[in-house]
Every structure is written in structure tokens, then in C-alpha cells.
Amino acid sequence: MRLINTGKLKKGSMRKTLYLYLIIILLLLSISFIPFHGVLAVQSGGQSKINAAIPAKTSIKIFGYTSPDSTVQVNAVRVFGQTNSDKTGYFEFREVAISAEALEICVNTIDSDKRTGFPFCFRLPDNFNVIEVGPLLLSPTVSLSSTKIWQNQKVHAEGKTIPNQPVEVSFFEISPKTLSQKISNYIAILFNNQAIAAELPILSTTSQRNGSFSFNLPTSRAIAYRVFIKAAYKDKPTLKSQTLTYSIGSNFSFFMIYILPWFILIMTLLMLASTTYAYDVKTHRIRKVMGKFIETRWKPYVIRLNLRYRRLMYSFQEYLRSRRK
């Protein structure tokens, strides 16, 4: 009979257990030091929950006015919020969580016609004793009715802002750059004694009940303009709108692009027709060639086409007769 040393067996099993525990501890420690940049979600029964914590300094209230039924957005580093303005143009963010990395917040408006306003940006204070910011008067939105504008063409701009408020439109002329604009302005100065002004008088209008407004653009001169809009609310001005730049094409350019090519084409065809007619009157060669072409080419083609048409009509009539039977 062979004897088994139970002491050695116990020591061997204890060593294996210790090794196993050490391996598990090392695995747990290595997993704990792996940097996870995302958030793990545990899914059970087809449902998942995601929990994330963003370090925030504080939360503030932001409110103000813009055009009615607009989308208002708040953006910053790790900060985003969105709301809609009511019928009066009032909007409000009750609690905007400010992240630790945020130094500046921008508030932007998108009106009901998808036009974007100029963003209203302000720097956050170092101490967060302020719990609300407002009222912010966001910029009007504006767009042009046409992108290609010619001299003396009727074009208007339209946009939206706070309802029933005064709107001021500022124009600034840009010196002519293209050759056609320079020629047109030189002719205007030569005959009308007009000098190029750097600034035009400010136009005034009033926004309607839904916040919309419109005004005509000056197009009497072939020059470029910069235009922006400001509104007011209780005698306080809003932020200025996006600055639009539009250029007016001169009548000389319109003539060179759209009229002169057709004029040259028509004149060329008339000269070609008159030259051909004079040559045929003198030599009768064109008439003979045309007569030969008609007799040998055109008339046989017409006869073959007529026969094909009759054959198709006969086949169609036979098909109808067979269907009746």
C-alpha cells in the first residue's frame, strides 16, 4: 500500500489558492488604473441608464427679448441650452449649469424663417454672486430678397426683431473695385456731380406685431454697400445684426453680359442672310442646289414617311377589327 503525505497536499493546495488570489488582486488593480473617458451603461431587460457628472460652478438664469417664435440657444464650453421665445419675443433660461471650464457665454437667436442673428457674448464674472443675467436684447435678423442686384432694380431687405419697436438701418458705401463700377461712377460724377459718400443717412422703420420689418435698398448707383440693423426696446438699443455686403452691377455690365451677345448674334445672322441672298440673286447657284436637294432627298423622305404612317394606321385598324370579332 502506498502512503500519501497529506501535509504536502495541504501546502500545495494553499499555494495554488494564494497564487489565484494574487492574480485576481493584480487584475483588479490593473483595471482600476485604466482611464475611462466615457460613461459605462449597464443594460438589463432592453433598458439602459447613462449617468454622467459634469463639474459645474453654479447655475444662472438668462432672460431677454428677441423676435417672436424664435429658437434661442446658449453656448459655452460644456454648456448648451435651447428654448423658444413667446409671442412677445420674451425668452428665459431658468437654470443654466455653468461648467468649470466656461469663461464666456454666447446667446444666439434663430428666427421662424431660419435666419440667424449675431451672437450676444458676455464674459462670466469671477465670483458667482450673480444668479441672473438680463434682460438681453438680441440682435435682429436680416436677409436680402435677391443675391444678384443690378442698377435701378427694386430690391428689399427683410428680417425680424422685437415686435412693435423702432428699427434703424445703417448703410455704408464701399469704394468701387470692378472696372464696370468705376466707369459707371465716373459717368455719374461727370454728368451729375455726385461724390462718393462714405456713409448714407440712417433709415428708420418699425417692426410689426410679429416682429417682421422690411425696407428698400438703394440701387441707383453701381457700387457696393454694407448694411446692418439695430432695434430698440424701451429706449435701449439691441445688439446690431449681421453686417450684409451687397454689390450693385452697373447698366454697362448688364448690357455687356445680357444684351450685347444677343445683338451680335442677330446682326451676324442678318448679315449672313443678306449676303447669301445677294449671292443667289447674282449666280442662282444656291437656288439650284436647294432644288436638287428637295427633289432627290426631301421629297423621297416625305413619301417614305407618309407610307410608314399609312401602314401603321392600317395595322391599328386591323387590330381593332380583330378585337371586335
Image: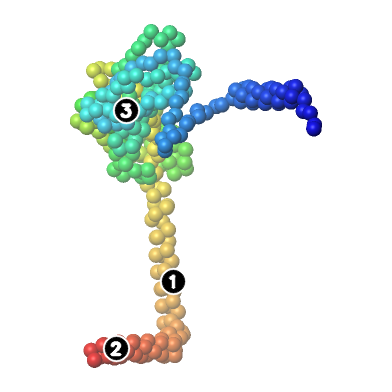
Residue 36 location in percent, x, y? 56, 26
Q: What crowding class fits label 2: few (fewer than 14 Cα within 10 Å), some (14-19), or many (20 or more)?
A: few
Residue 80 location in percent, x, y? 41, 26
User: What amino acid is at disc 3?
Assistant: Thr
Label 3 close to label 1 by CB (< 8 Å): no
Left/right placement of residue 157 relative to residue 58 reads left
Residue 232 location in percent, x, y? 27, 22
Image quadrant where residue 98 sits:
top left
Give me the residue at 43% from left, 85% from top: 290
First in residue order: circle 3 vs circle 1: 3
Mark 1 sits on what residue? 272
Q: What crowding class fits label 3: few (fewer than 14 Cα within 10 Å), some (14-19), or many (20 or more)?
A: some
Local SS, label 2 = helix
Mark 2 sits on what residue? 319
Left/right placement of residue 156 relative to residue 186 reads left
Query: In terms of depth relative to the viewer, which is nearer, 301 or 43?
Result: 43
The Cα–Cα distance between marks 1 and 2, rounded to whole angstroms, is 52 Å
Left/right placement of residue 292 relative to residue 133 reads right
User: What amino acid is at disc 1?
Assistant: Leu
Local SS, label 3 = strand
Mark 3 sits on what residue? 83
First in residue order: circle 1 vs circle 2: 1
Give me the residue at 29% from left, 43% from top: 154
How many numbered badges does the structure rendering display?
Answer: 3
